[in-house]
Amino acid sequence: MKNMKISRTPEESTKAEAESSEVRKIVPVEERFHPKRVAMAVLFVGLSVIFACANAWKGHLATGGIFCEFLVVVPLCLVFVIFMLHERKTRRLWYEDTDYVSLVTLYAIANGLLLAGSFFIPEWLMPVMLASFIITPFRDRTLSIAASVIAVSSYALGAGVSGRIVCLYLCEAVIAVMLSETVFEAEKIQKIPLFIMIAALQMLLPVAVQYFEALSISRTEMEYALVLALATAVFAVFILPAINKRMNREKIYHYQTIIENDYPLINDIKLFSADEYERARKLSVLALLAAQEIGADPYLAAAGGLYYRVGLIRGDREIDCAMDIAAENGFPEKLTSILYEYQGLIRRPTSKESAIVHMCDSVMRRMDAIAKKGNQMNSTWNKQMLIYQAFNDLSLSGIYDDSGISINQFLRIRDVLVKEL
């Protein structure tokens, strides 16, 4: 990467600081130490201890047994929390819900299901797959499977189940997490095959393990296994996607995280060029304001504007480089699409946010071109005419036909730029 040091006059530095201050007011910077996240991490460990005690009490463990269960469950939970914090620090948790509320809630429900089931369901028929499916709407597979393993371990140690049963639990947890994404994204035509697969797995695995344990299987046990299989399949295929959709309607990708000043990629842009960084910030704020004006996702637009030209820091093949950077940083699909639709060179904007960023960038490029010729466009009237002409040209080009932007929204975005530039 090429490092460039840009020298600026005192007046330019003062102006840049003022613009940065304005950006911070519009785009809130998240606290590095968030009490709610700490509280949720502590609550996760606390819930694990509570359920471990409950499982130990249900299993009639002596004091030594309870202590041994703590020696397994508590370190597991602490390692889980450390890994969760690391995932967030390295920007792999992309949700606005990085306060972990949804994970802790789902984890508590899954543990409660296992504890309740232990009172009237035989060990080999415990709804472990169902409990693991409950955790999966958090949409982080590693954390989902780790949380499932902790819940299963807590129950298994308290109940004192055999190694074969533990193996069954782990298989069911892994199957649930591995199939969850397929279930969430399945089309209607795919639901029946998934229903049959999940029901078959949920029935055959416990029956096989029970036969290992008792060397026999009764008709009644087969019927119980069938009921659990159907219940699990119905929940996973028909109910869970609705829960996931509802949760993720509120759990928007945490674009605020990647527009923070301390995000590593922003530092790379600063090192490449201070001017490019300031331009990216300005484009980000314009896109955010325009998105707010028409009811689009303001933070997706802000992130799209900030990284719209990020490919420049790697070389001339801007879009290819941007795709590499997006993959390395695990950018969400919607943000990656905006970068792929850069200037409409490969594909026209396919979302309102992408169209907004394209409009703002197009106007700024025209202003940059005039500024390079020495005309700073001090006249407000001249700027307004330039913006009107730019939007007129964009309208005639038909480049936003696939974006869902209406004529009214198009004009409102134009008015925002006239006001802000």
Image (tube, rainbow, N blue to C red):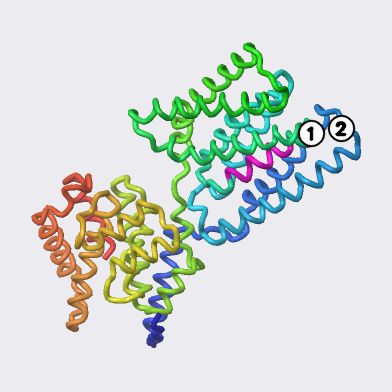
Question: Label 2: which residue?
Answer: 61
Label 1 environment density (alpha carbons within 10 Å; few <14, some 14–19, many ≥20): many
Q: Residue at x 31, y 60 (%)?
A: 339
Q: Which of the 4 image quadrants contains residue 130?
A: top right
The question of residue 179 being in magenta is answered with no
Marks 2 and 1 in Cβ contact (< 8 Å): yes
Q: Read off the magenta span.
A: 144-154
Question: Label 1: which residue?
Answer: 158
The amino acid on which the numbered mark 2 sits, given as a three-letter code, is Leu
Residue 385 numbered tag? none
190 displayed left or right of 241: left
354 or 167, which is in the foreground?
167
Residue 54 appears anywhere in the view: no
Q: Which of the 4 image quadrants contains residue 347?
A: bottom left
Question: Looking at the magenta stretch, what is its main secondary structure?
Answer: helix
Nearer-N-terminus badge (2/1): 2
In the rendered view of the protein, which quadrant contains the C terminus? bottom left
Q: Residue at x 68, y 43 (%)?
A: 44
Q: Residue at x 71, y 25 (%)?
A: 123
355 or 225, which is in the foreground?
225
